[in-house]
Image (cartoon, grey):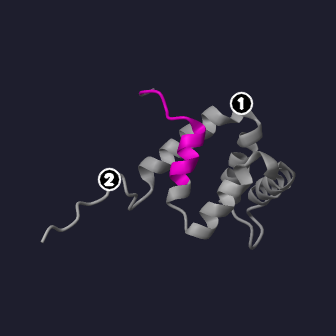
Amino acid sequence: MSAELPDFHALIERFEARLPDLLARRSRWLRQPQSRPVRIPAAALLTLGGVFSFLPVLGIWMLPLGLMLVAVDVPALRPPLARMLHWIERKWPGRPADPPPADRV
């Protein structure tokens, strides 16, 4: 494909930087090793919610989030999810690739 993708965890950290503060803090907490008893059920519920996205309230957005949480514990899922995160990073509208230069007065 192209050059080697950044590390899965580095991509997650860049993704979290774009989230609102509360969501980013929760995501960082869920990825910590001591959060595994909460992370596994949360990942399972998000993945199931994504599978049943045809039902009201649930959505397809839940599936990638659940898979990202699973990938913290299952290294085999990291390369495909790193590709997905890299794709999202390139396609996300308004992404701050480089901060705009400050106006100099």
- List the residue tagged with mark 2: 98
Residue at 56% x, 56% y: name it: 16
Disc number lying in front (2 or 1): 2
First reached walking from the N terminus: tag 2 or tag 1: 1
* Magenta-colored stretch includes residue 7: yes
Give the secondary structure at mark 2.
loop
Instruction: Let me know if residue 60 appears in the view.
Output: no
Residue at 55% x, 68% y: name it: 20
* Magenta-colored stretch includes residue 8: yes
Quadrant location of the C terminus? Answer: bottom left
Q: Position of residue 73 (x, y in %)?
A: 77, 39
- List the residue tagged with mark 1: 76
Q: Are marks 2 and 1 in contact (CB under 8 Å)?
A: no
In this view, 78 is above or below 65: above
Is 96 on the left-hand or right-hand side of 10?
Answer: left
Is 1 on the left-hand or right-hand side of 13?
Answer: left
Is 45 on the left-hand or right-hand side of 91?
Answer: right
Q: Residues within 10 Å of mark 2 (few under 14, many from 20)?
A: few
Q: Nearer the viewer, residue 25 or 90?
A: 25
Quadrant location of the N terminus? Answer: top left
Report the amino acid beneath label 2: Asp
Find residue 33 and report its image quarter: top right
What range of the chain is rendered magenta?
Answer: 3-15
Point out which mark residue 86 bears: none
Residue at 55% x, 38% y: name it: 83
